[in-house]
Image: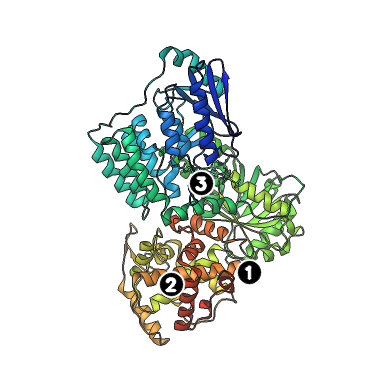
Amino acid sequence: MSNIVSVVSQNEVAVITINNPPVNALSAEVRSGLLDALTQAQADKSIFAIVIQCEGRTFIAGADIKEFGQTPKLPHLPDVVLAIANSSVPIIAALHGSVLGGGFEIALACQYRVGLKGTTLGLPEVNLGLIPGAGGTQLLPRVLGLSKAMNMIITGKSIKLPDTADNALVHAVTDSDVLACALEFSHTFVKSSGGQKLNNKIVEQDDAEDIKQHALKNLVSKRKGQTAPLKALEAIMYTTQYSLEEGMKKSRKLFLECRDSPQSAAMRYAFFAEKKAQKPKLPSISAPLKNIEKVTVIGAGTMGAGIAMCLLASGLSVYLLEINAENLERGMSYIKNTLSSSVKKGRISEQQAFEQLARLTGTTEYSSIADSHLVIEAAFESMVVKQDIFAKLEATVSTECILASNTSYLDIDEIAYVVTHKSRVIGLHFFSPAHIMKLLEIVKTKHTDTNVISSCMAFAKTIKKQAALVGMCYGFVGNRMYASYGREANFLLLEGCSPEQIDKALVDFGMAMGPLAVNDMSGIDIGYKARKENPNLSVDPAYFLAANLLVDSGRLGQKTGSGFYAYDEKLNRTSDPIVMDIFKNAAQKLNIVPQSYTSEEISERLVLALINEGANILQESIAENAEVIDTIWLNGYGFPRYYGGPMFYAQQLGWKYVKEKLLALHQQTGKDWWKPSTYIDSLL
Ligand code: TC6
């Protein structure tokens, strides 16, 4: 027997223990160990029940994702699940931690489940471009009913174990020792009842078709372009026609189609890319990480208030500092209103909102924030304003306090110029709305201390953000790449494409919104001002000319009722022929010849711009690896997860193809930025 699965007999119950850190994933060794342990336990005539439990922080958190994409090894998980489901000796799963994917399928195949309060259960396979492939689609509807099971499987969302036994999902709940609970349950209940058969019946539900149609409607908006949730839906519906075993066989086929799809390869890559981004290579440090419990946010605008809400939700104490009482009051009210609307929507309880507000202190005095462990400046994007704030911080907080700027593009080394201990200055670039968006770009400067970087990486985890460590350059990684993407959208407008045509092409590619609609929403003037302040930007007369012309004519986007599009009071978007006249006149003056492009050509051009800029960023070591870039684009800019991120997408296209396309664009446009990055040559 493998040493990661052991079996011992305890008072007439066989206890099978899996010990495969960190998350007890179902590697081939665990699968075969489990089968062997089952055979051994079932052969022991002195036992009347079997308990399956796990060592460490969690029950089985799923199949071993690293194994997908490799030659499959026997035994397959569905065979293990069936061996459990068909066991003549009753099996009790003792659950704690995260019971996910294949782990939940194992638990569902057991005749009984007991669990520790707070345990999480879920079938998150769709997040990896998969469907539950070991019977989850057949077992869960038989336990929870079609509607609840469908909702869990196609959204991939987990649920908490009920606080009390419901005799369907869970048969006993404890808040202490889950193995003791399983053993007690075996002796008090299973021994006398002799166990129960798994529900193998066809699911009979009159409104099955309505449930399916409702789910389909949701998928179109929430899982646009993804194939796995559709296949999951198909598999779930098998429960209304086939027995458990028949349904398992048929759903296995759908699982294999998903497993071998490019979408799943990309989503599995994304899973590991995000983990890798959280672990940058840094020199080892001996000093303990900095304790960050009290945080000051400077600036109570939309960004500052959003950051404050994110910190409050994570249990931290927050000072919100503003320049005057009026601005402060606006920010504080915004936070209070958002929290009370979250209570109304049932996202948090009244008590939670109360506790969060109790940890928030608004102030206009620097002297009140002296005991901060971290200050995040989210003031106006001006070097003078930021340097003034950092000089005040230098005079106020302890030298141990980390000083962070939330700037989107300013040089943080220059901001740090006014600070004596520059090693504690760092960029913490949140994305708006900061209490919702997952990404946190952590920007190290020339001087940032390793301990400060590591403490901020840990801080990101505390506030449930996806961290990505990057180096200093204009726009860092995300916005620098976004500028190349927006640049091409602007050129295409001058070449005769309409905003609708460009936006539709990118939405069809998989982006949540097109670049011009996004620009209208965020305000076209923001980039305009940033470009005006940056003397190093391109001198090409057509560079962002379309956007600049709109701003010059007062069309700043949604906030002025017009931008690339026209808007009514409800912000409904319609096309506006005037903009095409503006672009046409400008193009004529610059002798830009109108072209016609297909949707694919448009999206490819914008995505190639991203890829080449990403490659330049890697060449300059601004990002440590492609995974950091992809993590940023998946979590901050809505790049379709089923493409893995721009750099993984490039790899899938083939770097040779990418280089040829870039060379062709260089030749066609004569613009230097289309010269393929030298980084690409290193990959050929
Ligand atoms: C499935 O089950 C399909 C079945 C059908 C088959 C027919 N495999 O996230 P953390 C690693 S699909 C391999 O930092 P946490 C992770 O890479 C699967 N490795 O910890 C990391 O490694 P590193 C369905 C895995 O406490 C380390 O464990 N299941 C797996 O913040 C720690 O991870 C899922 O999708 C895995 N399944 O969160 C669950 N899981 O230290 C995916 C984790 O070398 N996992 N690792 O970087 C999770 O959601 C979370 O890891 C967690 C723990 C909630 C279990």
Q: Residues within 10 Å of mark 3 (few under 14, many from 20)?
A: some
User: Separation of disc 3 and disc 1 at Cα?
Assistant: 32 Å
User: Closer to the camera, 613 or 684?
Assistant: 684
Q: Which quarter of the image is occupied by the C terminus? A: bottom right
Q: Residue 237's x, y, as percent? A: 29, 40
Q: Residue type at mark 1: give it.
A: Glu
Earlier-in-chain disc, 2 versus 3: 3
Earlier-in-chain disc, 1 versus 2: 2
Q: Residue 486's x, y, as percent? A: 46, 70
Question: Toward which corner of the image does residue 578 lie, by quadrant?
Answer: bottom left
Kindly identify which residue carries mark 2: 605
Q: Residue 107's x, y, as percent? A: 45, 31
Q: Residues within 10 Å of mark 2 (few under 14, many from 20)?
A: some
Earlier-in-chain disc, 3 versus 1: 3
- Left or right of 623, for residue 335: left
Mark 2 vs mark 3, foreground winner is 3
Q: Is mark 3 within 8 Å of ligand 1?
A: yes
Q: Residue 620, which numbered label? A: 1
Q: Which quarter of the image is occupied by the N terminus? A: top right
Label 1: which secondary element: loop
Label 3: which secondary element: helix
Q: Residue type at mark 3: give it.
A: Ile
Vertical comparison of 501 with 641: above or below: below
Vertical comparison of 274 with 616: above or below: above
Label 2: which secondary element: helix
The residue lying at 40 percent from left, 27 percent from top is: 86
Mark 3 vs mark 1, foreground winner is 3
User: Closer to the camera, 362 or 311?
Assistant: 311
User: Closer to the camera, 507 or 205?
Assistant: 205
Q: Residue 65, which numbered label? A: 3
